[in-house]
Amino acid sequence: MCAPSGGVRRRAASCRVISGVKRFPATEAYRSDTTTIFITFDEGTGSNQVTTVVVDPSTPSGTRSATPFDHYSLLKTTEELLGIRTQLAHAGDPATHGMRAAFHL
């Protein structure tokens, strides 16, 4: 069982994601350090905390961060990794934390 809770559809989707992620490190895109995968489980509780998994050759397994990140943090990080200089919405706010340093990207 890939997802401990949720219906059959959620478990099936979880299994497909896990299967794809397990194959990803064998790809040239991964080995060339040009691709990062972010998996965000956007079903947080009242605490507004959600899990995000970062898959990248430069991110050590088990890396965690105590820094509070939000959707704009992910947007900011994605824009930075793609070399986009003009940041959308609150991704450009000085208070928005990027994720690059925390995850060695």
Image (cartoon, grey):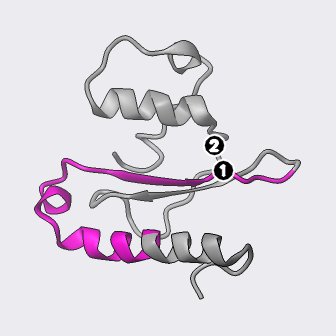
State the image coordinates of residue 90 (x, y, percent, origin top left). Answer: 58, 17
Q: Read off the residue under disc 1.
A: 42
Identify the residue at horizontal 34%, vertical 76% (top origin). 22
Q: Taking the image as drawn, is residue 19 in sight?
A: yes
Number of callouts: 2
Placement of 94 over or under 38, stated as above or below: above
Closer mark to the observer between disc 1 and disc 2: 1
Farthest right residue? 46
Placement of 36 over or under 95, stated as above or below: below
Specify the amino acid type for callout 2: Thr
- Displayed quadrant of residue 58: bottom left
State the image coordinates of residue 36 (x, y, percent, origin top left). Answer: 32, 51
Residues drawn in magenta: 17-45
Specify the amino acid type for callout 1: Asp
Identify the residue at horizontal 16%, vertical 56% (top origin). 29
Q: Taking the image as drawn, is residue 93 in sight?
A: no
Is 32 placed left or right of 63 in the picture? left
Q: Residue 67 carries which label?
A: 2
State the image coordinates of residue 92 (x, y, percent, origin top left). Answer: 50, 14
CA gap between label 1 and label 2 equals 17 Å
Report helix, strand or loop for mark 1: loop
Identify the residue at horizontal 72%, vertical 53% (top origin). 43
State the image coordinates of residue 57 (x, y, percent, origin top left). Answer: 27, 61
Placement of 69 over or under 96, stated as above or below: below
Dot 1 alpha-carbon crowd within 10 angstroms: few under 14, some 14 to 19, many 20 or more? few
Farthest top residue? 86
* Quarter of the N terminus within the rendering: bottom right
Q: Which label's residue is closer to the chain start, 1 or 2? A: 1
Q: Do the residues labelled 1 and 2 touch (CB within 8 Å)?
A: no
- 21 in magenta: yes
Farthest bottom residue? 1
